[in-house]
Image: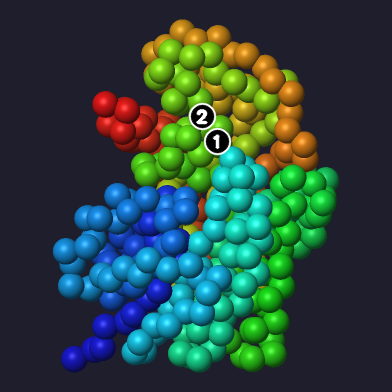
Amino acid sequence: MTKQKRILITGAAGFLGSHLADRAIKEGYHVIGMDNLITGNIRNIEHLFPLPNFEFYHHDITKFIHIPGELDYILHFASPASPIDYLKMPIQTLKVGSLGTHNCLGLAKAKGARMLIASTSEVYGDPLVHPQTEEYWGNVNPVGPRGVYDEAKRFQEAITMAYHTFHGVETRIVRIFNTYGPRMRLDDGRALPAFVSQALSGNDITVFGDGSQTRSFCYVSDLVDGIYRLLWSDYHLPVNIGNPVEITIKQFADEIIKLTGTDQKVVYHPLPTDDPKQRQPDITKARTLLGWEPKVSREEGLKVTLDYFKSVLA
């Protein structure tokens, strides 16, 4: 009989972590979820608690991590990820990207586990290259307000590569672009939940800047599929996973108003410091190395997400 593979998911009660846990359960893994719940929500994974192949550790990974028994994989997804969170918790954001990643890599080395880290398109900063390829080194302001997140992720990539080259740890790096779907927090400050919550509550839609800045939105099931394909691949350098279909923030606000059937007007506020003007992944590597590309259209994904937000607000 084949031994059940064991996988640790940090940030398991978060938006992405909970979907990754669902997929791992579906794939037949024994899942160990870990979260300190400063931005995660236990409700995202409570449906997994009755399962014999799921266990949960309420733990801060910036402290020493102890997992008894064998471990095959680690998915490191613990971190505040929205501007509203990392601006409110700058020190925790830097610590989870540095100390937390160091602890996870030490655990991977000790257990002989393969580790995948969640990096981000934010390593590209406010890009001077468009679309962004993995070879682009970025345009990041290390001392600006967003630097706590951007530089935490850039350090995370650097220490991961150091453990790979110096200690021979099997590592994978995914650079995640804007993702959406059920279990996003309505108050997390990102464009999609902000626009939907404003529209559904009858408030005007707030657009920062003139709305000409672009984003590319990937539905969560597509992202999760790309992440697992990368985990199972033999490629150790960073890979962009995101939807290359680009849209301006103003167009996106108009789409949300149309989808919700509301008649709010769009109001404009100053653009936050260092806010990226363009965000579009070049996914050539994901296509060629992983055979991956997004399948869920924005129209289809937004309908499911809107239904989820309506259920939360009901």
* 1 and 2 marks in contact (CB < 8 Å): yes
Q: Position of residue 268 (x, y in %)?
A: 67, 17
Q: Position of residue 31 (x, y in %)?
A: 31, 72
Circle 2 residue: 194
Q: Specify the quadrant that holds the C terminus.
A: top left
56 to the left or right of 262: left
Circle 1 residues within 10 Å: few <14, some 14–19, many ≥20: some
Compared with residue 275, is residue 138 higher up or lower down, i.e. above or below?
A: below
Type of amino acid at the residue the image marks with label 1: Gly
The disc placed on residue 189 is 1
What x and y, as percent, mark residue 185? 43, 40
In the rendered structure, find residue 126 and report the number of the disc placed on it: none
**From where the camera sits, is residue 96 visible?**
yes
238 relative to 207, above or below: below
Q: Quadrant of residue 306?
A: top left
Q: Residue at x 71, y 73 (%)?
A: 158
**Callout 1 secondary element:** loop
